[in-house]
Image (spheres, grey):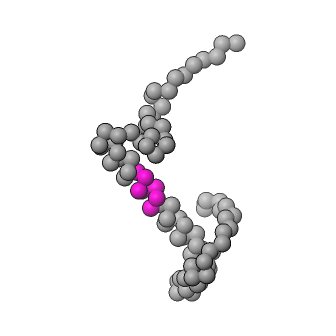
Amino acid sequence: MSIPLKDYRTAIPESVDVWLEIEAQATGKDKATVGREVLLSWAKDRFHAHKVAARRLQANGMQPELFGDEPADAGTTRNHTRRTA
């Protein structure tokens, strides 16, 4: 089962459009598929870079909130309060 696709449209420079067409023709894929593959590859690279940066910061005694994130705690430090009716 494949992941559902979202519609995403944006303007691109003519040179990028030409390269998408070239890649599509060279690989026998349609231009939209090539574009999706490029964006997926970019997203995977960014995710990997974020993980590497977080590990390096932690190794140097810094917290990941430098990215604007909360410190990693696996849910162990959150305050759980119960409501009483």
Dividing the image into 4 quarters, which one contains the N terminus? Answer: bottom right
**Quarter occupied by residue 20:** bottom right
Which quadrant is the C terminus positioned in?
Answer: top right
Instruction: Give the farthest residue toward the left.
Output: 60
In this rendering, position of residue 68 left or right of residue 53: right
Q: Quadrant of residue 72?
A: top left
- Regarding residue 29, the answer to whether it shows in the image is no
Above or below: residue 83 compared with residue 58: above
Q: Residue drawn 52% across and 23% down? A: 79
Image location (x, y in percent) of residue 16:
57, 79
Q: Position of residue 10 (x, y in %)?
A: 66, 69
At a point 67% along the width and 61% down the height, the residue shown is 6
**Of 52 and 27, the residue lying toward us:** 52
Q: Quadrant of residue 83?
A: top right
Q: Is residue 84 above or below residue 53?
A: above
50, 29: nearer the viewer: 50
Magenta segment range? 45-51
Q: Residue at x 62, y 74 (%)?
A: 12
Q: Position of residue 8 (x, y in %)?
A: 67, 64
65 up-or-down from 49: above or below: above
**Most common SS among magenta residues:** helix
Q: Residue at x 35, y 40 (%)?
A: 62
Magenta-span inclusion, residue 48: yes
x and y percentages locating residue 5 in the rendered image: 65, 62
